[in-house]
Amino acid sequence: MEKKGNIRGLLPLMVFIILYAGAGLFLGDFSKMPLLVAFVITSGVAITLNNKDNPISLNDRIDIFCKGAGDPTLILMVVIFILAGAFYSVANAMGAVNSTVNLGLSLLPAKMLLPGLFLVGCALSFSMGTSMGTVSALTPVAVGIATETGITLPLVCGVVVGGAMFGDNLSFISDTTIAATRTQEVEMRDKFRVNFLIVLPAVLINLVLISMAGGSGVVGKAYEYNLINIIPYISIIILALVGLNVIYTLGTGILIGLVIGIMNGSFTFVETFGVLQRGMGWMEDISMIAILVGGVVATMHHFGGIDWLLENLTSRIKSKKGAEFGIAGLVSLLDLATTNNTVAIITAGPLAKDIADEFGVDRRRAAGLLDLFASAFQGLMPYAGQLLMAAGMAKISPASIVPYSWYSMLMLVMGCIAIMINKPNLKKAK
C-alpha cells in the first residue's frame, strides 16, 4: 500500500507542544503562555504548510483551515460553551449556585463533599452520555464548594472532569461507545463489561483519594439555602436524563433561572441582558481556541500528519500484547492530535479492527481499549473541550486542572495493567 503520511504534517502539533508545554516547564508556570496565543501562533504555522511536489496556493490553504475551523461539530461545541457560560452567570446571579452548594454542605459530611460530587458526575454523565453537558452542569456547583470550603479550584474541577469522563467512557449513549462498538462490530453490553471491569478499581481508588483531599467547611456554621433557587439545576438534570438535546436543556435552564431571578428580585428584566452577556463573555477565549484547534487539525489531516502517525505506529506491532498496546497508543496519539476522542476512535477504529484480527485480540477488548484510552486522554489535555469549559467557568488555567484529573490518570494506569495481565477476558460468543 502506498504511504500517504508525511511527518511535516505534524509540524503545527510540534510547534504547539514546544510553545505551550516548553514555556510552562521552563518558566514553571503554564499561564505564562496563554492557550489562545499558543494556538494563534500554531495556526500561523499550519497555514504555511505546503506540499513540495504539488504545492497549493495560500488561498487554498486558508480555505482548508477555515473549513476545519467551521466544522459543524466544533460550531455546536462553541454554542454549548456560550450557553453554558450564560447559564452559569444566571445561576450565580439568581442564587442557584449558593443554594445548591449550601444544601450539599448542610447534608453531606465535609469528607464526603468531593466523593459526592464525583459520584453525581458519574451518574449524570452515564445517564446523559455527554461529558460536556456534565461539566457545564456541575462546574458552577464545584466552584461554589471550593469557595465555601477552601478546597482549591483546580481540585474540584478535576473531580468534575473525572466524573464526566466516567460516563463518556461507559455510557451506552455516548458518542465514543457508539463509535468504538460500530468500528469493531461488537455489542455495546460486551464493550461495557470490558470497560467497567477495568475502571472499577480506578473509581474506588479515586473515591479514597478525593475523600482524603476534601475540605473541612466552616465548623458550626449554618448554611442558608432556598429550594426554589435550586430548580434551574434540577431542571437541567431531569431534562438531560430524559434525553433532551443539550442546547434545549441549557436554554430551558437559563429561562427558568431568569424567571426565578426576576421574581426573587436578584435582577430586573433589563438587567438580565447584562447577566447573559457577562456569562457569554467568560467563554469567548475558550470558543476561539476550539475554532482554531479545528483549523489546525484539518490542516494536519490534509498534509499527511495524521496518516504518518497511523503508518509508523502500526508498523512496529509484533505480538498480541503489542497489538493491544498499539491500539491504545494509536487512539491516544490521535486524541492528542485531534482533541476529539470520538474522531480519534472513528479514525483509529478500522485499523484497530484489522490489528485485532491479525494478532488474535478479542474485538470486544479492542473496542474497550479504544474507548478507555481516548476518554482518559480527553480528561488530561489542557486544550480539550472538557478542561477548557471547566477552566473557563472557574476562571483558572486549564493546565492547572491536569494534575488533579486523578480519575483520568487512574484510567490509563488500569488500562495498561489490563493489557499486561491480559484481563478481563470475556467468554467467547456462541
Image (cartoon, rainbow, N blue to C red):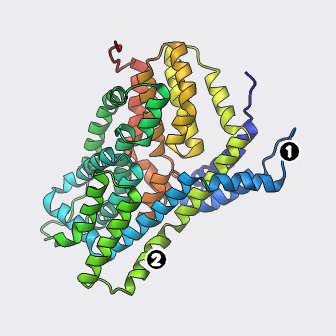
Q: In terms of depth relative to the viewer, which is nearer, 5 or 236?
A: 236
Q: In terms of depth relative to the viewer, which is nearer, 410 or 229?
A: 229
Question: Which quarter of the figure is the C terminus placed in?
Answer: top left
Q: Which residue is label 1 attached to? A: 55
Dot 1 alpha-carbon crowd within 10 angstroms: few under 14, some 14 to 19, many 20 or more: few
Element at label 2: helix
Left or right relative to 274: residue 202: left
Element at label 1: loop
Left or right relative to 21: residue 400: left
Residue beneath the point at 39% across and 48% down: 130
Q: What percent of the width, then of the height, locates residue 384?
A: 51, 50
Q: Is residue 215 visible?
A: yes
Q: What percent of the width, then of the height, locates residue 250?
A: 37, 63
Residue beneath the point at 66% across and 37% down: 306
Left or right relative to 362: residue 92: left
Say above or below: 231 vs 298: below
First along the sequence among labels 1 and 2: 1
Q: What percent of the width, then of the height, locates residue 181?
A: 43, 30
Q: In the figure, residue 94 lies in which quadrant?
A: bottom left
Mark 1 → mark 2, Cα distance in angstroms: 44 Å
Q: Which residue is label 2 attached to? A: 277
Disc assigned to residue 191: none
Q: Amino acid at mark 2?
A: Gln
Q: In terms of depth relative to the viewer, which is nearer, 26 or 88?
A: 88
Left or right relative to 65: residue 156: left
Residue beneath the point at 54% across and 62% down: 287
Q: Amino acid at mark 1?
A: Pro
Say above or below: 31 vs 369: below
Q: What percent of the width, then of the height, locates residue 305?
A: 69, 38
Dot 2 alpha-carbon crowd within 10 angstroms: few under 14, some 14 to 19, many 20 or more: some
Q: In terms of depth relative to the viewer, which is nearer, 111 or 328?
A: 328
